């Protein structure tokens, strides 16, 4: 199944170089893959995976290992962000 995978801010460096300019790439996953299974190959430091959205809807940390992705989903991840 094909989803859209987006990494923002400092996480963009974990994407392949060809995907970094737009921070987005198509990602082909086996049917039944969870959010954690989708991000595992990218070796994202867990402390940097702060805000996770699937199709614009927040997924809590405790649900990321059981939330099954579907064909066409958009998975977006942001690190912790500080502001003033």
Image (cartoon, helix red, strand yellow):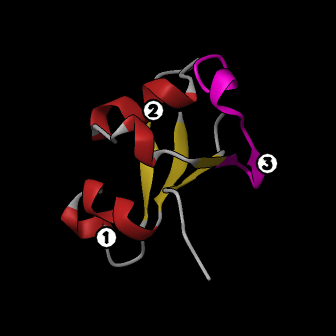
* Residue in view at x 49 percent, y 27 percent: 36
Check if residue 43 falls in the magenta segment: no
Image-quadrant location for residue 61 = top right
Neighbourhood count class around disc 3 (C-alpha, 10 Å): few under 14, some 14–19, many 20 upward: few
Question: Which disc number belongs to residue 57?
Answer: 3
Image-quadrant location for residue 18 = bottom left
Q: Marks 1/2: CA distance?
A: 18 Å
Position of 65 compared to 21: left or right? Answer: right
Residue 69, percent from left and from top = 64, 30
Q: How many marks?
A: 3
Provide the residue designation for mark 2: 38
Residue extending farthest left: 17
In front here: 13 or 46? 46
Residue 68 at least partly seen: no
Provide the residue designation for mark 1: 20
Which span of residues is magenta-colored?
Answer: 53-68
């Amino acid at each position: 199944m094909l989803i859209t995978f987006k990494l923002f801010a400092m996480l963009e460096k974990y994407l392949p170089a060809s995907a970094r300019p737009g921070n987005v790439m198509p990602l082909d996953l086996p049917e039944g893959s969870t959010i954690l299974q989708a991000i595992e190959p990218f070796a994202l430091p867990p402390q940097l995976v702060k805000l996770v959205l699937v199709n614009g809807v927040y997924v809590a940390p405790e649900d990321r290992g059981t939330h099954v992705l579907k064909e066409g989903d958009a998975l977006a991840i942001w690190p912790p962000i500080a502001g003033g």
